[in-house]
Amino acid sequence: MTSTNNSNSARPFKVLGIQQIAIGGPDKQRLQTLWVDIFGLEKTGTFRSERENVDEDICAIGTGPFKVEVDLMQPLDPDKKPAVHTTPLNHVGLWIDDLPKAVEWMTARGVRFAPGGIRPGAAGFDICFIHPKGNEELPIGGEGVLIELVQAPPEVVKAFAALG
């Protein structure tokens, strides 16, 4: 596939870097043994949502604008959906410098988003998800991977811009 870069297709946003990875399992305590006890990640918070069927611990690698969140997730009910534990690497989160523009631009090009639209996420940033599968109307999806787009706060945008 060839990429063109004319003014009609200029991307009005930037993917700045990895914001998070989310790891699912039937028991987040087992995940904590590796990620917190062995690797030494710091547990920075928790998030629980009946709607999203998740009980998660939010951990961190790194500091400042280059901190990467590692979410350790288990389902509240293993028989309900979404089944956050059935895909061990549940999703990848990407920092986006202008989330509304990104969603508008990608939708116009056939990217399928998961239901829910742009909304506050567990870590306090606005988020939305690219659906793992495209469909007839919107054929571009994550090819089996759920992708979270996360609105980067100004200090993260500035830090990535300083890198060049």
Image: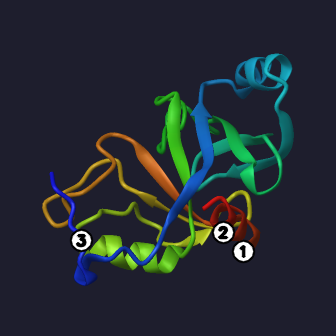
Pointer 1 with pointer 2, Cβ within 8 A: yes
Q: How many C-alpha atoms fall within 10 Å of the one at disc 1: few (<14), some, or many (≥20)?
A: few
Label located before the other in sequence (1 or 3): 3
Residue 157 bears which disc, if any?
2
Foreground residue among 38 and 134: 38
Q: Position of residue 31 (x, y in %)?
A: 70, 23
Pointer 2 with pointer 3, Cβ within 8 A: no
Labels 1, 3: front one: 1
Give the residue type that dot 2 points to. Val
Q: Which residue is mark 3?
A: 109
Q: Position of residue 144 (x, y in %)?
A: 33, 40
Residue 16 bears which disc, if any?
none
Say which residue appears at 77% left-offset and 24% top-offset. Answer: 32
Residue 154 bears which disc, if any?
1
Label located before the other in sequence (2 or 3): 3
Labels 2, 3: front one: 2
Q: Position of residue 84 (x, y in %)?
A: 53, 38
- As helix, strand or loop, the secondary structure at mark 1 comes to helix
